[in-house]
Image (cartoon, grey):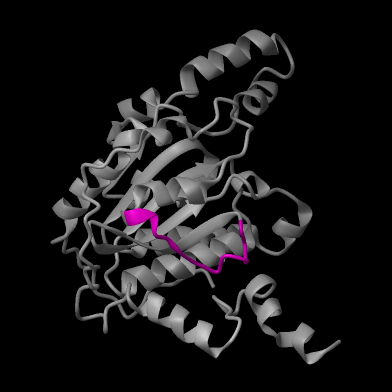
Amino acid sequence: MTAEALGGARTHTRTSGVAHLAAQDDVHAMAATRELVSYLPSSNKVAPPVKLTEDGRGRQDAALDMTVPSDPLAAYDMGGLVRRVLDERDFLEIQPHYAKNILTGFGRMEGHTVGVVANQPQELAGCLDIDASVKAARFVRFCDAFNIPILTFVDVPGFLPGTKQEHDGIIRHGAKLLYAYAEATVPKLTVITRKAYGGAYDVMASKHLNGDINYAWPSAEVAVMGAKGAVEIIFRGKNTEQETLNYEDKFANPLVAAQRGFVDAIIEPSTTRTRLCEDLELLRGKRRERPWRKHGNMPL
């Protein structure tokens, strides 16, 4: 075991998650640091910096209407989707090589800094696991600490199953993300692009965690689980084909969630940027204080 393998940059940015970014040399490190700091306020008592941009809120990207595949099992790049919504398609990803099934990073909307959390269907189908939960929870708390609004893009089939995850405490670690979103008082905007199943739907900035504005695309599904798995459990293998069609007809669209108030509106994907910019302007003066307490009891 070499010192580099034990605690080098590659180890801590890919395996342990201790380090967030790595650089090739000191010049690259300083340039990356400048870029990161350009998104951040000088302290938690001031607003994040604003960068002038010519990329207005009226820009609508028709490619977003075709980004999500019709096949619910097909993968797509959530990173590319996020970039199409942000100013000038600039997205500074944080911890890009660790827990790659979830994306975290900074971007701008009309020049104002936003933090982004998004499931990545290209890795583990976008499932939440222990590492992804902790990575996202820490990022959400950072954004909340420095008054940075949070945009969440959801395509999550659930928590990763398996004895390893269960024995290592996926429930406890997943609760960290739930706690972080519930405690955050900055503007929280959520877009469900495709699947939002079970407990993983809850923890991804759902309306139940005081999400300010929650949207769904027409391709969204908000349900306990996928049609095939649900029907096999409920009907125990009897008449599964017809019941699967019935389940899909009821839940393979966001209408039921909208009727119950779980989402505020069903929007066309190409209008996402315009909607989010308008909402961020509306929420820019948001003030919400937590009830006084010495501290919360985070599930450590």
Residue 60 percent location from the top left of the image: 29, 38
Q: Does residue 93 appear in the picture of this structure? A: yes
Q: What residue is drawn where x is 40% and y is 70%?
A: 141
Q: Is residue 146 left or right of residue 15?
A: left
Q: What residue is drawn where x is 74% and y is 16%?
A: 237
Position above or below: 211 against 223: below
Q: Is residue 137 left or right of residue 161?
A: left
Spot the residue most to the right.
1
Given residues 222 and 19, the one toward you in this image is 19
Where the C terminus falls, by quadrant? bottom right
Residue 61 percent location from the top left of the image: 35, 38
Given residues 279 and 294, the one toward you in this image is 279
Q: Which residues are magenta?
A: 88-100
Can residue 93 be found in the magenta stretch? yes
Given residues 73 and 240, the one toward you in this image is 73
Q: Does residue 262 appear in the picture of this structure? A: no
Q: What residue is drawn where x is 51% and y is 58%?
A: 103
Residue 283 percent location from the top left of the image: 18, 55
Q: What residue is drawn where x is 38% and y is 30%?
A: 257
Can residue 198 be found in the magenta stretch? no
Position above or below: 244 against 126: above
Position above or below: 80 against 109: above
Q: Is residue 152 left or right of residue 3?
A: left
Q: Quadrant of residue 165?
A: bottom right
Q: Quadrant of residue 116?
A: bottom left
Q: How many marks?
A: 0
User: Mainly helix, strand or loop, the magenta region?
Assistant: loop
Where the N terminus falls, by quadrant? bottom right
Position above or below: 254 against 106: above
